[in-house]
Image (cartoon, helix red, strand yellow):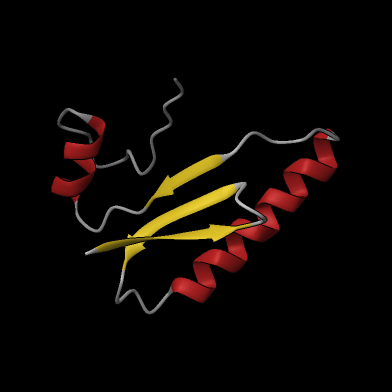
Amino acid sequence: MLKELKLKKGKVTLVMKNNDKETRFVLKRISESFNKLREFFDVSLPPLKIYLAYSREEFDKFVGRKTDSWEVGHTNSP
């Protein structure tokens, strides 16, 4: 089962498994990266929704196609 975690007053939503033991690590890294991007570019970033995939099959389903082994992330904007 996936759950949503909100970070930075609703600016970042992280969707991950309920039992993921790396929750704190992932949230810390996202928070640090979010702050660095905001400071470097001196802009307000749009809301982000980050899904963590736990298998290649899950990643393929999310992307909507068979992905190559080197593909480790995907972006999508409305």
Numbered-mark total: 0
- Position of 36 with respect to 10 (left or right) is right
Check the image and report above or below for 12 versus 16. Answer: above
| Image position, residue 76 (x, y; %) | 41, 27
- Position of 44 with respect to 56 (left or right) is right
| Image position, residue 77 (x, y; %) | 46, 23
| Image position, residue 24 (x, y; %) | 52, 75
Furthest residue in direction top, as rendered:
78
Check the image and report above or below for 21 versus 69. Answer: below
Residue 1 quadrant: bottom left
Quadrant for the C terminus, please: top left
- Position of 7 with respect to 14 (left or right) is right
Check the image and report above or below for 20 versus 35. Answer: below
- Position of 59 with respect to 71 (left or right) is left
**Residue depicted at x 43% and y 75%:** 22
**Residue depicted at x 35% and y 54%:** 52
| Image position, residue 61 (x, y; %) | 16, 38
Furthest residue in direction front, as rendered:
9
**Residue depicted at x 38% and y 79%:** 21
**Residue depicted at x 78% and y 42%:** 38
